Image: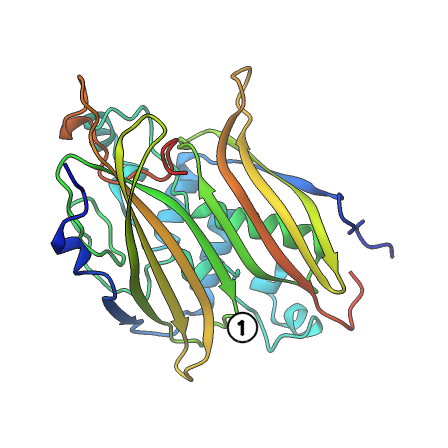
Amino acid sequence: MTGPDVTAGSEVPPLERTIGLRDMVAYAGATWDWHRLHYDAEYLAKRGLPAPVVDGQVFGALLAEQLQDWLGPRAVVRRLHFRFKNLVFAGETVRCTGRVVAVDGDTITVEQRIVLIDGDEPERVAVEPAGAVVVLRAGEEP
Amino acid sequence: MSLLTEEIRALVGTEVSYTAPEPLGRAAIRYFARAVGDDNPLYTDDAYAREHGYDGVIAPPTLICETNQYADLPPDADGYAGHDWHIDIPGSRKVRGGNAYTFHEPVRPDDVITATWRLDGVTERRTSSGQEMLVVSSVAAYTNQHGTLLVTNEETIIFVAPAAGPNTGPEAAPGKTDGSEEAR
């Protein structure tokens, strides 16, 4: 079995996810975070927000998933960082992209970002900069 | 107007600790994985996890940084039930800046999580459009009942002062907004 191409400059396969209100409600429950920003229409209207706001913390989970889906179960994410650029609203679709910056033995450094890919609108960045350090544990083929 | 009051400055160095009332649990792990759409069997299949060098299922790495399970706090007026420093700057918008996680050990279902938050620093800055903002940096260390350090979470929260002009009163200011153009 051939593993993924992991050299400096390699692209990390993108991860796309449409985040609907149902997903956001599930996430609010799963994380014990019932902030009204994520579901309460009246609360949002009072603050001039057009739709429920996706909890930014979920993007950490997606960035980690993108790397583990690519590298398999021997990959251990050691560090992950991300900064928020723009709000994401219920029903929008995000795409996590990434690129390998460096490979040092079993340690891989990647740069990532998250953009919104809705329709013909100009690209809106949700998360940038972002990135991770992943270690491939020995003794396992990907 | 300065956002950095003596009262806020005095909070720097403050620590607060929360210990979960129960182990993290397999259901919490499966629920989280389902909610974020991650079907990795490491989180649900003991045999698969053992084949890959773990003692059984593990939690998705970012779970304990995202959940408020350990805090066991009642929800506030906004419905939020997690750790908060209760910094109140009238009229400001509170936005998330970002996070940096370091994963030291895998988190297991039988781990009883203690989170220790420390307020590391507060810095005044200006947005590109000239608005004043206050950047609050905190660090959370998550340990289990054996005292093992599992994860560290460096978090930045930003308070953006209201700009002069129309529609910038408190009614137009979201209490909590995840991300913003200013949050750079």
Secondary structure found at label 1: loop
The quarter of the rendered structure image containing the N terminus of chain A is bottom right
Q: Is residue A89 left or right of residue A71?
A: left
The amino acid sitting under disc 1 is Glu
- Residue beneath the point at 69% across and 48% down: A101
Vertically, is B21 above or below B160? below
The quarter of the rendered structure image containing the C terminus of chain A is bottom right
- Residue beneath the point at 53% across and 70% down: B104
Q: Image quarter for residue A68?
A: bottom right
Q: Chain of mark 1?
A: B
- Residue beneath the point at 61% across and 64% down: B42
Vertically, is B17 above or below A29? below
- Which residue is tagged 1? B105
Pick the front one: B122 or A8: B122
Q: Can I make out residue A11 in this image?
A: yes
- Residue A52, given in percent of the width and then of the height, sits at 33, 32
- Residue A105, given in percent of the width and then of the height, sits at 76, 64
Pick the front one: A59 or A19: A59
- Residue B160, given in percent of the width and then of the height, sits at 26, 36
Vertically, is A126 above or below B164? below
Q: Image quarter for residue B82?
A: bottom left
Pick the front one: A71 or B50: A71
Furthest residue toward bottom: B146
- Residue B73, given in percent of the width and then of the height, sits at 21, 61
